[in-house]
Image (cartoon, rainbow, N blue to C red):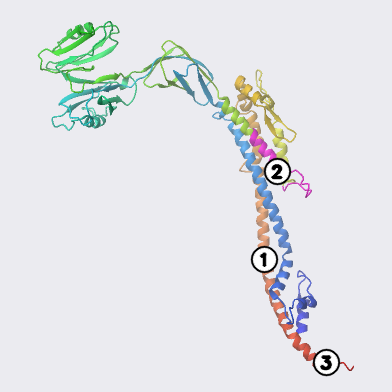
């Protein structure tokens, strides 16, 4: 086949979908004086024309992508609003939050659990719960060697442990005692004593401090030391004893233990008489007197001068450690709405259902008023949040219907049925009117809460009106949102939104699934077109254009041969 025939064959064989190709256009593809075709460019131009349907499908995919992004944003905003409605339609949500106000927050504060019944209560704090504490006399240093001695720690529950100091026991200093007390258990049962020991150091030296780990009378404990002579701290002239328990272990054999309870107003003289009157005899003699300063004194001595006895009260002489009772473990005493309450802790629960009292100070006989009410701050925050989320949702919806002045077109979802119906549903949902089954209410519409709707459907809140409703009509506000059985405004709006947001068959899911399916179909169509048509076309066109290019390369030689046969020269025949 001649080169011209090959080129003409290529042109005549081009398919209908391939752009029109002429001999002149192919010849125009040659460069310089060398005949030939840029096969790569020629094939690319033909394939580009063949891909016109693909570009239309890809444009559809771009539109679908924009629609999916826009609809997903609207879906997210609508779901946030639906969550707000659920929050306002919950027995544990902000409408059920409670705050407690105390008329004397220096002595008493309180917190209330969600849903606690609102009301006012009267509390009188007579005394606080205390933690038992004892401390020893001072030693120069925590490492100072202590003389041999012993003491017994006994808890109110009957646990007991005797600590032996010195004489090869391994307990020789205050540091050793801290370790021993913290690890001590009841001698009989092995149960921990429930106390803790620390060192307290100041300018006077170091002392061992022992405290119970919990407060209350049940956590009280006593410390007793063996004495042959014991002297009570001097008591100012005219002063008397308070209510207390004094436990003595006798200086007789077998040893017996006796507890003497002092009454408020008693004197050392009366206490001495009580000790001496114990039967059988404790083997001690108690003597009351007066020192040189006029202070009342009390001393207890072993009758034989050698047999030791123990006493659980502070000592001034006769023992190496000289423990002093700093605090007695005691229960808190209070009345709640006239009912007497005892509590081992200053945090009292159960005296008022849902309320936890925090006792900070005692004021016997002084009533403190506690008011349990709706937490207006939390409710206000929740209401303002739903207004903000509503405005976000309606703003995204409205933007789809705004006409662009440049393109004179709406948003990508301007004709989407889901978005069109959602705009109407959002605005209509807020036309809700609450009517109580009985009685009247001050809050029947969102307008009564200071919430108004503008012409574009957005909401605004008048804070003064809202705060007034929350302060003065908290119950009406809660009834408006929750109805009689979680069937009020919040439930009504949520149900309207659930038509769109339901993960099972909501309009958003259906619409987005349809978009995704259409996009997948287009991708499949493009892939099929590429593999089923474009790939074969590229092969055919490459072969055809390559053949034409070879023919064009041969064309100059063939033209020269033709000219020679015709007797033509390159300069022509000047003689005619």
Q: Is residue 424 above or below residue 471?
A: below
Q: Secondary structure at mark 1?
A: helix
For marks 2 and 3, the one nearer the N-term is 2
Instruction: Identify which residue is drawn at 72% across, 33% down.
Output: 428
Asked whether residue 405 is drawn in magenta, I would say yes
Query: Gap in Å between the C-alphas at discs 2 and 1?
Result: 34 Å
* Label 3 element class: loop
Give residue 126's mark.
none
Q: Which residue is mark 2?
A: 418
User: Which residue, given by chain and number where applicable, does mark 3 sit on?
Assistant: 568
The magenta segment: 387-412
Quadrant of the image occupied by residue 380? top right
Q: Residues within 10 Å of mark 1 (few under 14, many from 20)?
A: some
Which quarter of the picture shows residue 136?
A: top left
Residue 530 image-quadrant placement: bottom right
Mark 2 vs mark 3, foreground winner is 3
- Measuring from the top left, give residue 349's x and y in whole percent: 43, 22
In the image shown, does 85 or 448 lie closer to the viewer?
448
Q: Are marks 1 and 3 in contact (CB under 8 Å)?
A: no
Tell me if mark 2 has few (under 14), some (14-19) or many (20+) residues whose alpha carbon lies within 10 angstroms of its own: some
Identify the image quadrant of the C terminus.
bottom right
Q: Residue furthest front?
A: 203
Residue corresponding to mark 1: 530
Q: Position of residue 293 (x, y in %)?
A: 23, 8
Q: Secondary structure at mark 2?
A: helix
């Amino acid at each position: 086949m001649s080169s011209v025939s090959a080129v003409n064959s290529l042109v005549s064989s081009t398919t209908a979908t391939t752009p029109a190709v002429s001999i002149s256009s192919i010849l125009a593809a040659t460069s310089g004086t060398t005949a030939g075709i840029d096969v790569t460019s020629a094939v690319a131009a033909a394939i580009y024309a063949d891909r016109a349907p693909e570009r239309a499908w890809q444009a559809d995919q771009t539109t679908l992508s924009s629609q999916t992004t826009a609809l997903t944003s609207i879906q997210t905003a609508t779901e946030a609003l639906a969550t707000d409605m659920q929050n306002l339609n919950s027995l544990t949500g902000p409408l059920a939050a409670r705050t407690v106000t105390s008329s004397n927050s220096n002595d008493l504060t309180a917190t209330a659990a969600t849903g606690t019944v609102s009301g006012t209560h009267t509390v009188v704090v007579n005394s606080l719960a205390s933690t038992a504490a004892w401390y020893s006399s001072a030693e120069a240093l925590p490492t100072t060697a202590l003389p041999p001695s012993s003491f017994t720690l006994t808890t109110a529950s009957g646990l007991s442990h005797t600590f032996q100091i010195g004489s090869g026991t391994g307990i020789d200093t205050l540091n050793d005692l801290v370790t021993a007390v913290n690890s001590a258990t009841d001698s009989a049962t092995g149960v921990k004593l429930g106390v803790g020991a620390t060192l307290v150091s100041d300018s006077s030296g170091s002392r061992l401090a022992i405290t119970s780990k919990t407060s209350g009378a049940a956590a009280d404990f006593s410390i007793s030391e063996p004495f042959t002579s014991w002297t009570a701290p001097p008591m100012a002239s005219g002063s008397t004893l308070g209510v207390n328990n004094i436990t003595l272990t006798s200086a007789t054999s077998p040893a017996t233990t006796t507890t003497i309870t002092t009454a408020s107003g008693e004197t050392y003289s009366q206490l001495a008489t009580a000790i001496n009157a114990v039967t059988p005899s404790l083997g001690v003699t108690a003597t009351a007197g007066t020192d040189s300063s006029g202070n009342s004194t009390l001393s207890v001595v072993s009758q034989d001068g050698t047999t030791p006895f123990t006493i659980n009260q502070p000592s001034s002489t006769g023992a190496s450690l000289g423990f002093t009772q700093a605090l007695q473990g005691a229960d808190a005493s209070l009345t709640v709405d006239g009912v007497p309450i005892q509590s081992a802790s200053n945090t009292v629960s159960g005296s008022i259902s849902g309320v936890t009292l925090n006792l900070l100070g005692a004021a016997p006989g002084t009533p403190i008023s506690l008011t349990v009410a709706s937490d207006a701050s939390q409710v206000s925050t929740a209401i303002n949040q739903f207004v903000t989320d509503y405005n976000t949702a309606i703003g995204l919806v409205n933007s789809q219907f705004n006409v662009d002045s440049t393109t004179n077109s709406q948003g990508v979802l301007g004709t989407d049925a889901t978005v069109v119906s959602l705009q109407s549903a959002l605005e209509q949902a807020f036309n809700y009117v609450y009517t109580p089954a009985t009685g009247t209410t001050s809050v029947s519409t969102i307008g009564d809460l200071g919430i108004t709707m503008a012409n574009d459907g957005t909401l605004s809140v008048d804070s003064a009106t809202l705060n007034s409703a929350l302060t003065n009509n908290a119950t009406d506000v809660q009834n408006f949102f929750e109805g009689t059985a979680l069937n009020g405004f919040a439930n009504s709006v949520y149900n309207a939104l659930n038509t769109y947001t339901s993960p099972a068959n909501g309009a958003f899911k259906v619409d987005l699934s349809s978009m995704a399916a259409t996009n997948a179909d287009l991708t499949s169509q493009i892939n099929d077109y590429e593999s089923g048509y474009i790939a074969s076309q590229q092969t055919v066109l490459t072969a055809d254009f390559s053949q034409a290019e070879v023919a064009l390369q041969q064309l100059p030689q063939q033209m020269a041969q033709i000219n020679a046969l015709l007797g033509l020269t390159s300069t022509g025949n000047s003689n005619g």
